[in-house]
Amino acid sequence: MSAMEYKQRHPLAWALIAGVALAGIASAGAIRGWWPGVGPDPLAVTCADCAIVESVSGDPFHYEVTVRYEDGSTGVISLAGPPVWRVGDKVRIEDGIRLVDG
């Protein structure tokens, strides 16, 4: 049986192969974000360690910085020296004690 005869006898098989290939390409595109509105929303990702400085208080030897995390919870970071951040600054907490620019 020649290839031409096989194609003529099994058109549904070829349609199935083409459909599977197209579905694979479409799935890969959705996962990689090639099509807008399809796949995960990159803006919906939140940072568990990101926060906004709510208050800064203390004396020359001990400071406390109160931060509000993106999930709404608050935390207090103790510092030995004056912080460089002001109320409203976006920061990221590293190692539970160190503030870095967000």
Image: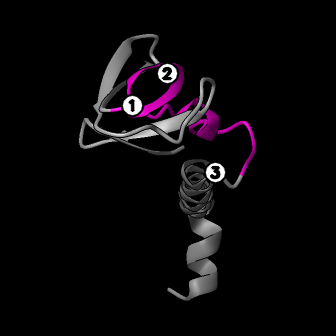
Residue type at tag 2 = Glu
Q: Is residue 48 magenta?
A: yes
Instruction: Kindly identify which residue carries mark 1.
Output: 48
* Label 2 with label 1: CB-CB less than 8 Å: yes
Q: Is residue 20 magenta?
A: no
Disc 3 secondary structure class: loop
Q: CA distance from mark 2 to mark 3?
A: 25 Å
Give whichever of discs 2 and 3 has the lower sequence position.
3
Of badges 1 and 3, nearer the viewer stands 1
Give whichever of discs 2 and 1 has the lower sequence position.
1
Instruction: Kindly identify which residue carries mark 3.
Output: 33
Q: Position of residue 15 (x, y in %)?
A: 62, 57
Q: Which mark is residue 70?
A: 2
Q: Quarter of the image for the C terminus: give it.
A: top right
Query: Over which residues does the magenta segment extend?
Result: 35-60
Residue 32 against residue 55 in the figure, above or below: below
